Amino acid sequence: MKHSALDQARENLRLQQVYNLFLRYGWELLFDRWPVLVGFHSRMQRWLWHLPDDLEPLSLPVKVRLMIEELGPTYVKMGQIISSQASVVPPEWEIELEKLQSDVPAFPSSQVREVIVEELGAPPEEIYASFAPEPFAAASTAQVHAATLDDGRKVAVKVQRPNIYNEMKADIGIMSDAVRVISRRSDDLKAIDLEGMVGQFGVSVLAELDYNGEAYNAFRLADSLSDIANVEVVEIYPTYSSSKVLTEGFVDGVKANDIEAIEAAGLDREALATAALQSMIKMMLIDGFFHADPHPGNILVDLESGQLTLIDTGMVGELDFTQRMNLIQLLAAVQNIDVQAMAEIMESLSTPFVDDFDQKAYYKDFERTIGRYTYGGRAIPFGEAINEAMDLLRRHGLRLDPNLTMAIKALMQAEAIATELYPEGGIVNQGVTIAKEMLVQEVTAEKIVDVASQQAMSTARELLKRVPSLQEATIGWLDQYQKGRFEVYVDTSDLAQEVDKLGVFLRQIVIGIVLMGMIIGSAIAVSGLTSVDPEIPYWLWMFRIAYFGFIGAMVIGFLMLARLVWRWMTGKNPMGD
């Protein structure tokens, strides 16, 4: 991410705002830590602000949620991501953080009008048949207004918050600087690659602010899910959209985890759970392009038809063929309660970030930790087991690829929704069967021909780029033929570098041998000369030469050793001299 002087100035101003907010809420949180001070603090607040005596004090999760909302969209977005991981968040925190997905203050309708005019070239009343000035939903980076098109279709107009890009970029810069500093002082933070996580978060969040990307993602995901019954992706209207305004179909539904409303509507919860799993498996494990934030607020259920609709397609992930096959094998290992296979697959999906990875200790620890969930042939709870497995990877110096981490988290979110709708199902019981059926459907003669044709066309295009024109090639060959020889060019630049390294290494060996010979020879000469008469000038002269040769060789050897140690300690190449 490029960093200009203007960006640095924005970060400094934003840092002061963040610092003031942390200081203000920090005093509140500090008083809450000591029960002795809580009562005194509450009485003082009632006296200063004339608060009623029966007013309930705010809990710690509520105060943190309010602080996050005041900190702004970047921190709200992080809170949303944390809240979607229900397996690692205490219930009271989960309830409060979930409010970040909807309870965000709206910005004025006058600013909404300015953004639409700037982006679409006309005010909303001229573009839409009707447009509600007050939003029906407000998110961390945008708010949504109800509208209708000229043909009567109901739409939702997503309008980006003014100046949000610069604010979020400054926040991400502050986060990156802070994480860079504290990661140098904490091995635990280095182990989880917090700096890389914040960097990836920053790239994803800033990319989400360009609604052209979200529109493209929606079209691509809709194509992927076109064969899944009762599942669709929200429809996008490109004519009424831009990088900061997105017009999409109005979805009248409830969150996928609103069990009470779903039961009241008489919908088949098992069918809904199966459809949710099918859509995630099709996107992720078959096509390799998936919705990376499938929390309940992004999967809406139509209470009349039972249709599932995916919204908010700004965050997506991609997996290559090998990664998809490994994830399918991981699901099969979990289904078969094969802890050894789980350990092997998780290791194959990871890369070590330490030099002393102990494979035997890793397998032993994996067996002991995950085995707690499997004794007596019990089924492994997918979410808990994967959380434990990822923690084991971190402790043993292994790290998943960021896209794989995103994919596994998305699977866990889909699993949470599916098991809440239908506890007897889930990714473990149904996922592998669904994946196998979809793989069989994908491998048809027609699709094989299509893929082969695409690969052949791609290869042909690449060949045309690399093959010279017939005229140039013919003239070149004729020139060489007339000279009576054909020239072959061999690139030895890499070989020359290795030869140079070998030459330096050999020089150091020769110098070491010479110095060792001088030391040993001088030592032998000095010891031999001690048996002759030192008063004879000739022998005295020889004795001094041998003595100073021994001392000189020792000094040179010591200096060379000190030089090598210094280069090694400063992280430089010891072979660089």
Image (cartoon, rainbow, N blue to C red):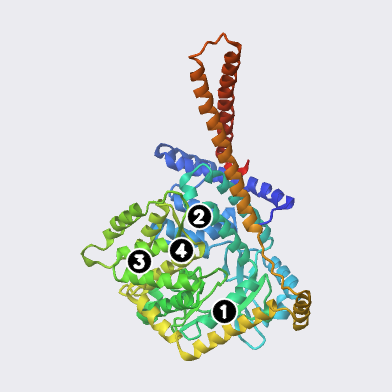
Looking at this view, name the residue that lies furthest to the left.
376
Which of the two labelled residues, at mark 1 and mark 3, occupies the earlier sequence position?
Answer: 1
Q: Which residue is drawn at 56% across and 17% down?
A: 543
When asked about the image quadrant of residue 113, the answer is bottom right
Q: Do the residues labelled 4 and 1 touch (CB within 8 Å)?
A: no
At label 1, which amino acid type do we have? Arg
- Label 3 packing within 10 angstroms: few (<14), some (14-19), many (20+): many
CA separation in Å, label 1 and label 3: 28 Å
Q: Which residue is drawn at 55% across and 23% down?
A: 550
Task: Indicate the position of residue 27 as horizontal and vertical percent values.
Answer: 52, 41
CA separation in Å, label 2 and label 4: 15 Å
At label 2, which amino acid type do we have? Arg
Label number found at residue 65: 2
**Tally of numbered tags:** 4
Location of mark 1 (residue): 220
Task: Indicate the position of residue 557 as horizontal and vertical percent values.
Answer: 56, 30
Looking at this view, name the residue that lies furthest to the top.
535
Which of the two labelled residues, at mark 4 and mark 1, occupies the earlier sequence position?
Answer: 4
Of 155 and 417, nearer the camera is 417
Q: Do the residues labelled 2 and 1 touch (CB within 8 Å)?
A: no
At label 4, which amino acid type do we have? Ser
Of 53 and 412, nearer the camera is 412
At label 3, which amino acid type do we have? Phe
Which of the two labelled residues, at mark 4 and mark 3, occupies the earlier sequence position?
Answer: 4
- Label 4 packing within 10 angstroms: few (<14), some (14-19), many (20+): many
Of 283 and 301, nearer the camera is 283
Q: Can residue 92 be seen in this view?
A: yes
Helix, strand or loop at mark 3 = helix
